[in-house]
Amino acid sequence: MLLGLFIGLSVTALVLFYDIRLPENYRLNSAGKNTSVTKTKGVDEPPPIKYEFYKILPEIEVVVPDEPASKSIQLASPSGEGSYVLQAGSFKKMPDADRRKASIALLGEQAAIQTVTISGGEVWHRVRLGPFTSINKIQALRQKLGSEGIDTILIRLRNK
């Protein structure tokens, strides 16, 4: 332990006494701030990154109509792609969405709140469960939530 302390103090002394210099663009001023704000001539700054996922995500979902339980529903494509979510409500006020999420949590299920802005500039908070690929899981969950008075909508997420 003493050897480590001795080595550390020796390196610190070397840096302080022999004034080992960092490259110019790494030097700090007396206040401890980096003074390397120089730009290279002829090099432009990269263009700002534009994120479009918040526009694309609301467009990649489809409401699946309710069908009798006797009909067979194939949820996943043969390649194993495709998923569905259950929407347990859409609310204008975040506290209402939080209450719905909490009531679902009390049933032992995990929901998420997705906040979206629709074309009129209105903000809605969607309470969703999933994604799922198993029809058995979806049917059981819909029945469980329905018995507690929570209506759900099955939404298929489009693959792009």
Image: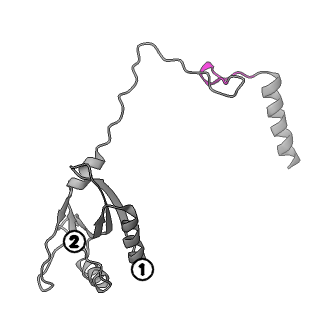
Q: Is residue 38 left or right of residue 79?
A: right
Q: Position of residue 26 (x, y in %)?
A: 62, 25
Question: Residue tagged by mark 2?
Answer: 154
Q: Main secondary structure of the magenta part?
A: loop
In which quarter of the view is residue 33 placed? top right
Q: Which mark is residue 119?
A: none
Q: Is residue 26 left or right of residue 92?
A: right
| Mark 2 surroundings: few (<14), some (14-19) or many (≥20) residues within 10 A | some
Residue 100 position (above or below residue 55) = below
In which quarter of the view is residue 52 placed? top left
The foreground one among 14 and 152 is 152
**Amino acid found under the numbered disc labelled 1:** Gly
**Amino acid found under the numbered disc labelled 2:** Leu
User: Which residues lie in the magenta part?
Assistant: 20-28
Q: Position of residue 101 (x, y in %)?
A: 39, 71
- At numbered mark 1, what does the secondary structure look like: helix, strand or loop? loop
Mark positioned earlier in the residue sequence (1 or 2): 1
